[in-house]
Structure formats: structure tokens, C-alpha cells
Image: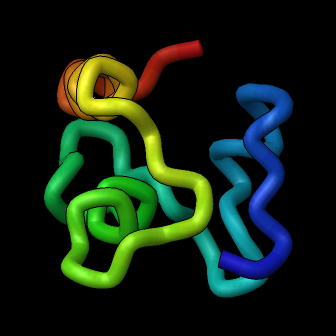
């Protein structure tokens, strides 16, 4: 995910050079989650607890 900046809510919601990585209300369709649960590990893996929290946040609409 080239160009992804997770340092603020605004930059997180902008996404990467390829577009949004979070689709509010749709964790399964969010590239951020897809990369984290995919078969090919990503260099910035979240812990299982972090991934659960992020998934819940996206499910609930990803509010600021």
C-alpha cells in the first residue's frame, strides 16, 4: 500500500496511492483488513487484538 499514512484520521481515510483502504461499515471490503488477513504476511501486521479493534471500528462506520 504505497503512500498509506496512518498517522491521522484524515490521512487514513484518504488511503494509499491506489485509493481508499477503509470502507466504513465494510471491513471485509476494506483493503487494510484484506492485507492483514491475507495469506501473504504484510510487513506491518497488527496484533490479533489490534485487528479485532480495527475491524470493529470499521464495522461501526469508522467514525473519527
Q: Is residue 19 above or below residue 26?
A: below
Residue 56 placed where, x, y %?
A: 22, 22
Q: Nearer the viewer, residue 20 or 33?
A: 33
Q: Quadrant of the N terminus?
A: bottom right
Q: Nearer the viewer, residue 4 or 38?
A: 38
Residue at horizontal 20%, vertical 80%?
39
Where on the picture, by quarter, is residue 8? top right
Residue 10 placed where, x, y %?
A: 78, 35
Residue at horizontal 32%, vertical 83%?
40
Residue 20 placed where, x, y %?
A: 56, 65
Where on the picture, by quarter, is residue 32? bottom left
Residue at horizontal 72%, vertical 55%?
14
Residue at horizontal 22%, vertical 25%?
52
4 vs 26, left or right, is: right
18 vs 17, left or right, is: left
61 vs 15, left or right, is: left
Amino acid at each position: 500500500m504505497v503512500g498509506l499514512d496512518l498517522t491521522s484520521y484524515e490521512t487514513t481515510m484518504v488511503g494509499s496511492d491506489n485509493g481508499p483502504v477503509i470502507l466504513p461499515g465494510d471491513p471485509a471490503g476494506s483493503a487494510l483488513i484484506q492485507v492483514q488477513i491475507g495469506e501473504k504476511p504484510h510487513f506491518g501486521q497488527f496484533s490479533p487484538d489490534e485487528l479485532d479493534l480495527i475491524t470493529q471500528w470499521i464495522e461501526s462506520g469508522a467514525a473519527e
